Image: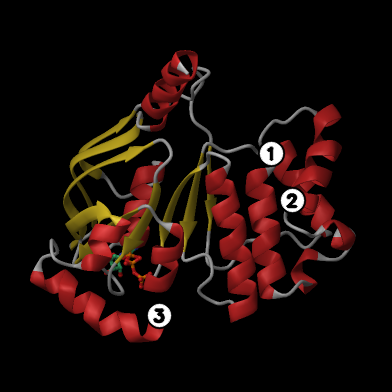
């Protein structure tokens, strides 16, 4: 038994290693202070959901964690620890509510993505095939990507991200425009990627989805971070400030 304990502790230490730390961070778009005073550390293995009303700053925070806050100047500090267990910089992929797909076949959308990321030609075909099988789109490889349903398009975007073997997946309302069946399929894939060890950060308006997928929930209001709690404590509500509790009350009936 003793021989088993040391690796388990090591694994835990790797999982809790920080990826990005924000200190008193803010983003201003001209006169608008979109985020301010954000103190937040993203850890390896987190399944982090960002919730809050429209315009509260979820997408901006997602982009800031990713390092995409340009051209808006960053206020405060953003520290990228960003080393994988093998000692290389972390790879991150981002998914949007409506994926941007080239007017090419499903397969070529993946191949071009791999080419753009510098994946050697000899590896591309096999990685493409594995990714399509992973998301259940192998039989549609030759279809035009833009002719796929919304759910299939989002699964293709997930395949394109997964083919790059990311350490972190940033998702901006990934199921917002999908019907319940497609939503379930996309959620299942996100859950599987997280189970495989990919760190997941997602913004969502769907509190049921945050409950199903997240281990940690951050609540934003008017650009400020008002709560950052493990998912069970967040939804219990006792530790939340009054505004966040009101938000939960207002949203829960429509989202569970
Ligand atoms: P939603 O839930 O509606 O997607 P959100 O919580 O993701 O909103 P953000 O998109 O981060 O919020 O926007 C925060 C604020 O910053 C909003 O007032 C928005 O109008 C503003 N904003 C976002 N991006 C820009 C931009 N590129 N230029 C100017 N203002 C912006």
Whichever of labels 1 and 2 marks the residue nearer the N terminus, that label is 1
Image quadrant of residue 114? top right
Q: Which residue has dot 1 on it? A: 116
Q: Is mark 1 within 8 Å of ligand 1?
A: no
Whichever of labels 3 and 2 marks the residue nearer the N terminus, that label is 2
Crowding around mark 1 (Cα neighbors within 10 Å: few <14, some 14 to 19, many 20+) is few
**Left-right relation of 58 to 137:** left
Under tag 1, what secondary structure? helix
**Is residue 141 placed above or below 167 in the rendered structure?**
below
Q: Which residue has dot 2 on it? A: 134
Under tag 3, what secondary structure? helix
Whichever of labels 1 and 3 marks the residue nearer the N terminus, that label is 1
Crowding around mark 2 (Cα neighbors within 10 Å: few <14, some 14 to 19, many 20+) is some
**Residue at x-position 41% and y-position 72%:** 208
Quarter of the image with the C terminus is bottom left
Image quadrant of residue 19? top left
Say which of marks 1 and 3 sits in front: 3
Residue 206 shows up from this direction: no
Viewer-closest of 48 and 29? 48
Q: Marks 3/2: CA distance?
A: 28 Å
**Residue at x-position 43% and y-position 39%:** 45
Viewer-closest of 12 and 95? 12
**Is residue 79 placed above or below 136 in the rendered structure?**
above
Q: Is mark 3 within 8 Å of ligand 1?
A: no
Q: Which numbered circle lies on residue 255? A: 3
**Residue at x-position 38% and y-position 85%:** 254
**Left-right relation of 211 to 189:** left
Q: Marks 1/3: CA distance?
A: 38 Å
**Is residue 113 placed above or below 204 in the rendered structure?**
above
Under tag 2, what secondary structure? helix
């Amino acid at each position: 038994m003793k021989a088993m304990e040391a690796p388990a502790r090591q694994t835990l230490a790797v999982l809790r290693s920080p990826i990005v730390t924000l200190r008193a961070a803010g983003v201003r778009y001209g006169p608008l202070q979109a985020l301010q005073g954000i103190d937040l550390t993203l850890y390896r293995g987190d399944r982090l959901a960002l919730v809050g009303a429209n315009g509260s700053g979820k997408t901006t925070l997602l982009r800031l964690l990713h390092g995409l806050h340009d051209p808006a100047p960053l206020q405060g500090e953003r520290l990228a620890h960003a080393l994988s267990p093998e000692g290389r910089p972390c790879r991150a992929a981002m998914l949007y509510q409506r994926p941007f797909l080239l007017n090419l076949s499903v397969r070529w959308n993946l191949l071009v993505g791999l080419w753009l990321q510098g994946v050697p030609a000899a590896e591309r075909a096999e990685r493409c095939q594995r990714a399509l099988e992973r998301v259940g789109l192998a039989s549609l490889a030759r279809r035009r990507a833009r002719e796929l349903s919304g759910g299939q398009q989002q699964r293709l975007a997930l395949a394109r991200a997964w083919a790059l073997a990311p350490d972190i997946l940033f998702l901006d309302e990934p199921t917002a425009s999908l019907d319940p069946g497609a939503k379930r399929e996309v959620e299942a894939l996100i859950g599987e990627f997280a189970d495989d060890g990919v760190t997941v950060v997602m913004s969502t308006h769907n509190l049921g989805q945050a409950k199903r997928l997240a281990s940690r929930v951050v609540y934003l209001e008017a650009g400020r971070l008002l709560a950052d709690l493990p998912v069970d404590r967040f939804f219990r509500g006792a530790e939340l400030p009054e505004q966040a509790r009101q938000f939960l009350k207002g949203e829960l009936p429509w989202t569970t």
